[in-house]
Amino acid sequence: MTSKNTNEKSRILIVEDESVVALDLKNRLQRIGYEVIGHEKRGEDAVETAVHLRPDLVLMDIYLAGTMDGIEAAAAIGRSCSIPVVYVTAYTDDKTLERAKVTEAFGYIIKPYRERELQITIEMAIYKHELESKLEAERIWSESTLSAISDGVITADPDGYVRYMNPEASRLINKDLHDCLGEQLSSVLPLEDAGESQNGQDDVRVGNINTSRTSFPVEYSIRNIVDSNRAVIGSTTVFRDISGRLAYERELLKAKQAAEEASRVRSMFLSNISHELKTPLNSILGMSELLMESQQDSESREYHRIIYDSSHSLLNLINEILDFSRIEAGTMKIKMEPFEVEPMLEKSFEGVLLPAHRKGLDTLIDVDPDCPEQLIGDEGRIRQILTNLLNNAVKFTDAGMVRLSLDWKGDGLELVVSDTGIGIPPDKFEYIFQDFRQLDPSKTREYGGTGLGLSISRRIAEMMGGSISVESHTDGGSVFTVSLPLEAAKTTGKLGILPPVSGAEGSRVLIAVESRPIREQLQKYLRQWGATPEIYKAGKGTEKKSGNTGGADLCITDGEFIADRGTAFEKTDAPLVVVAQAGKVLPPELRRQGVCILIQPVKRRVLYQVIESVLTGESVSEAGGTVGNRWKTETPGAIIHRSKAAYLGLLTGGGNLWEDFSFEEFERVLLELKERYAGVKEVESPLFKLILLTRRKDNESLQKAINQLPGDFRNKLHG
Amino acid sequence: MRILIVEDDFGSRRLMQKILSDFGTCDVVVDGEEAVQAFQLAWEENSPYHVVFLDIMMPKMDGHEALRQIREMEKSYGIEPMDEVSVIMTTVLEDPKNVVEAYNKGGATSYIVKPVDRQKIEQELKNLKLVE
C-alpha cells in the first residue's frame, strides 16, 4: 500500500491476457489498497504503456497474446526504464525460470496464490526497488564527487588492484580508466617517494611520478579504507601535480635572495655615504670652531658662529636622516655596555645649554638616589633620545624652565623631560610621534628639523624594549616620559645621597636665587649635606628676611638676582657661588676674588665638591679652580648677555649701553615687549623702530633713538 | 638708497644685510607681517624704501601675501604703478611655480634664486637701474 510517499497509493499495471483473471486480480489489488492504472493483454502494449505511464510496479503474466511473451516484455521494459516487474504465472518449469531470472525480476508468484502472498511480494518488490534506486543515486553522487575533485584519486583493493580512478588521475598519468582497472596500483602509478611534505599535514609526502609517457613531481598521500569493523578493505591514493608550485617556490627564493642582497648593498651605501657626508662637514665644523675662537672682533666672531651653527644643524640633519634610514633598513644596533648614569644626564644637557640660556630658560637635573650608579645599555642612543626631547623642550618654551628628572623603577629607568612651554594639545599627542610631522612648522624656520626626531626617539626606545609618552603639565607645559628597562652593572653601587660634609654641621648658607625649583633643589642638597640653608629675599625696598648677609658661611646666587635687586651682596665677605645661565655677564661688583661660577644645570657632585671645599676651609676661588670655573670655556664664542631687566631699565630709565652689549638679546627683549603690548600704538610703534635699529647693529643711532623715546612710552612700560 | 630685507632665516639675512649695506641703509625684518609694518612706518616717516628683497617662504605671513598688502597700500597712497617700490623675490630653486605666481599676479618686479651672492644682487640692482 505504501510507497515512498505514504499519501500516495502505489500504481500497478496488470499484464494478463485472460480478462476474467485480470479483472479478478484488479479487484483484489484495489481491495488491498493499490491503484490499478491499466490492464494490457499483449506484450508490446505492455511495454508501451509501462514506458508511457510509469507505474510503480508491473504484474506480468508470462504467457500473453501477441508475439511478445511476459519475459521479453519485462526485458524490454527493463532496457528503457527502471520499473520493478513481478511475474504472476502458473508455469514453473526450469526453462521458463532460467529465462525469467535473466530479466532480474523482483518477484515470482505462482498461481494459484493466496492474496496475502500477492501483497507481500508486491510490497517487497517496491521496497527493494526503492533501495536499489537510492543505492544507484548514491553511487552516482560518489562518482560525481570524485570526478569533481581537482586532485587525482585512485582506489585499490587490499591486494593492490585498482578498483577506481577519477578523471583527474586519468588525466595526470595519461592513462585510461579501463586500462587501469584490475591492474596493480604500483604499475599504474609508479611513485618514487621524496620525503615529507612541508605543508604541515602528517601523512602527506612528496615524490615523483615517472611513467613512460610522463614525469612530474607530486604531493601525495595514501590512506587505508576501513569498514565498520576496522578491517582494511582497500586503499585510497590522492595526489597532485606540484611542478607549478615548485617553480613558484624557486622564484620566491630567488626574490628573497635578491632582496637580501639589495639590503646589504643599501647598508654598505649608507655607511659609505655616512662617511662621505660627514668627513667634509667635520672639517667645516672643526675649522670654523678654531676660527671662532681666534677672532678678535665680535663681528667676525659672529660670522664664524653662524657658519658653525649652520654646519652643526646640517650635521644633525644628516644624522637624523641616516638614523631614519638605518631604522627603516633594520640595521640599527643597540649596544649593551655599562655606562655611568649621572654623567650621561649631564652630557645630554650640554648640547641644549646655549640655546636654552640664550632664551633665558632655567635648566635643572633631578636624580633619584636609589638609582644604580652604572647601568648596562646604549648610552649614546639614550643620550640621543634625551637630547632630542630637550631640544624640543627648548624650542617650544619661551620662558621658565626645562627640567630633566630621573626615577629608578627597580627594573628600569623613567626619564622625564618637562618644560613650562606652550604645551601640546591632547589630540596631537600621537601625531607628533609620526614620521615627518611637526607641531609648529614655523619653529622649523627658526630651529631647523626634519620632523623625524620624535619618531626616531620613539623607535630607538622601543628597540630597547621601552617607550616614550607625553602628557600636558597642569600649568601649560609638556611632560615627556621615557621608560627604559635597564639592568644595573654587576659591581655598581647606588647614586645615593651624598653624605654630610664633615666639619660643616650648621654652616649658614644663604640662597639668593630667582627660580623656585632651583632654590628648592639647593635647599634639599644643603640639608642633606649638613648645612643650614636660608632663603634670602629682598623685594623692592622691603627688608631682607634673613637679616644681614654678613655672617653667612657661603652665599649661593644667580646672575639675575644681583643685577635686579641691587648690590646687597657686594657688602658680604662671604664666599660666593654663582649658579648662572651660560653667557650671563657678571657685574663688576662681583668680579672679585672669592667667586666660583657654576653653569646651570647644577651638577650635584660638582656643587658638593665646591661646598665641601669652602666649608672646610679652602678658598672659593681655589675650589672653583679645581672644580672648574668654566666661565670662558663653556661658552665658546657666545655673545654675552645682560639680564632682561637691565635692558628694560635701559628703556625706561635711560642710561648707557655697556661695552659687552648684546644686540640679539636686546632684540629679543624688544620683541617680547612688542608682543606683550600688541595693540598699544604708543608702545608698539617705537618698539618696532628700535627693533629695526637694533638689527642694523648701529650702536650710535640706537642709543640716540633710546634717548629720544617719548615720555608716555616710558610711562606705559612702567605701568 | 633705503633697502628693506625680508628674510626669516638668520644666516641668510645677515648675509644679505652685509652685502646690501654697501648699497644703502638696510632694514631687516623676519616675516611678512613685519615687512608690511616696516613699509608703512617708512612711509609715515617720509623716507620710503627704494627696493624690497622679499623671501617667499616665511612664517606668519608669506611673501605673496606681504607683497599683495604692500601693493594695496601703495594704491591707497596714490602711487602710480611706475613709481611702485621694486620688489625682488628671493626663492630656492624648487619652487618656480611660486615665483611665477608672484610675478604674474602679485606685481613682483623680479626674482633671485638662492643661495645669493654679491654678484647676483649687484646684477639685479643694475638691471633695475637702482645702481649704475
Image (cartoon, coloured by chain):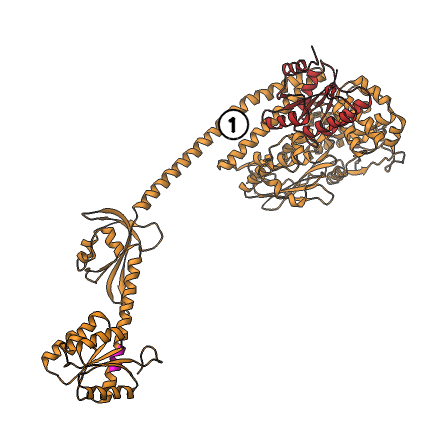
Q: Amino acid at mark 1?
A: Ser
Where is residue A594 shown, x and y percent of the image?
78, 25
Determine the secondary structure under disc 1. Answer: helix
Q: Nearer the viewer, residue A84 or A652?
A: A84
Chain A visual colour: orange
Where is residue A230 shown, x and y percent of the image?
27, 67
Count up the numbered dots. Answer: 1
Say which residue label 1 marks. A274
In the rendered image, the quadrant that contains the N terminus of chain A is bottom left
A385 vs B26: above or below: below
Residue A167 sits in quarter: bottom left
Q: Residue at 23% of width from left, 71% of height from top?
A: A81
Q: Tell me if I can see residue A622 in this picture.
A: yes
- From the rendered image, report the letter of the chain displayed in red: B
In the rendered image, the quadrant that contains the C terminus of chain A is top right
| Magenta stretch, main secondary structure class | helix
In the image, the segment drawn in magenta is A122-127
Local crowd size for mark 1, using a 10 Å CA cut-off: few (<14), some (14–19), many (≥20): some
B62 vs A239: above or below: above
Q: Tell me if I can see residue A618 in this picture.
A: no
Magenta segment includes A312: no
The residue furthest top is B132
Q: Nearer the viewer, residue A113 or A616?
A: A113
Where is residue A101 shown, x and y percent of the image?
15, 76
Callout 1: chain: A
Residue A107 sits in quarter: bottom left
Q: Nearer the viewer, residue A210 or A41?
A: A41
